[in-house]
Amino acid sequence: AQKVTQAQTEISVVEKEDVTLDCVYETRDTTYYLFWYKQPPSGELVFLIRRNSFDEQNEISGRYSWNFQKSTSSFNFTITASQVVDSAVYFCALSEAQTGYALNFGKGTSLLVTP
Amino acid sequence: GAGVSQSPRYKVAKRGQDVALRCDPISGHVSLFWYQQALGQGPEFLTYFQNEAQLDKSGLPSDRFFAERPEGSVSTLKIQRTQQEDSAVYLCASRSQGFGNTIYFGEGSWLTVV
């Protein structure tokens, strides 16, 4: 069963629009970690943010913000005023005890930002 | 180096050939992971090391896949008798001590089996 679901396969926006990437996860552990990674065309996975299950405080970092809600098992990611350089595939991932805290990735959301 | 280093970056292998992919993790990182990423898919877990011990190899797709980390640093992923379905990007990642710490990835080794 898919533990991390990213329902949006592809999103296309025009530069300067805001865009939210959805992530829903499934776990029975009480201690777990959630991550967002960005994968540009070059292929390297770039770490964006990590949250532990006890920290529901949402955060804004520059143009990025995150909304972690345990009640709905969601960990959504928003880019404000998108730029062409934001074009990439974005992966949400879950790390939990039963998998030795390895990352379990969603299938990714491909974001295209056009000028 | 500062990041996770993988070699070769690109490898074309004839079907049936053996290949070896190398990963040099971030210095001091005790955990090392291998992932396989097929085109258009998310990375899939292959195996995990804590120092030199291979704690989980449940993701290795067949007994043709073998990974080792004999001295707890550099790791090698070996694929024997490659098949076309092995074509993928193989990503190595490492993490410092602590389960919740960030896992950092290398640029990957792009394997094409022809």
Image (spheres, coloured by chain):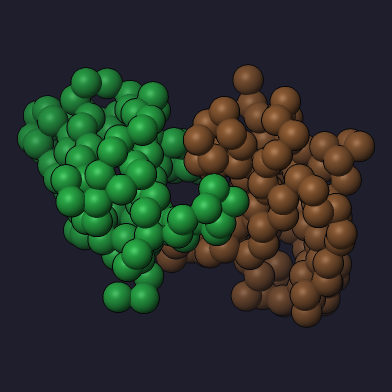
Chain colours: A brown, B green
Q: Give coordinates of residue B99: x percent, y percent.
A: 54, 48
Residue drawn at x 38%, y 60% as measured from the top left: B29
Residue B83, image x and y in percent? 20, 28
Residue at left offset 36%, top offset 33%: B55
Residue B27 visible somewhere in the drawing: yes
Q: Is residue B101 above or below residue B64?
A: below
Residue A12 placement: quadrant: bottom right
Q: Position of residue A112 (x, y in %)?
A: 67, 62
- Tell me if residue A20 comes above or below residue A79 in the rendering: above
Quadrant the C terminus of chain A occupies: bottom right
Q: Can residue A109 be seen in this view?
A: no
Query: Where in the figure is residue B3, as x and y percent of width and height?
Result: 37, 70
The front one of B28 and B47 is: B28
Q: Is residue A15 left or right of residue A101?
A: right
Residue drawn at point x = 45 percent, y = 59 percent: B96
Kindly indicate the quadrant of the structure image that contains residue A14: bottom right
Give the residue drawn at x 70%, y 70%.
A114
Task: Choose between B79 and A100: the one closer to the eye.
Answer: A100
Looking at this view, name the residue that lies furthest to the right: A71
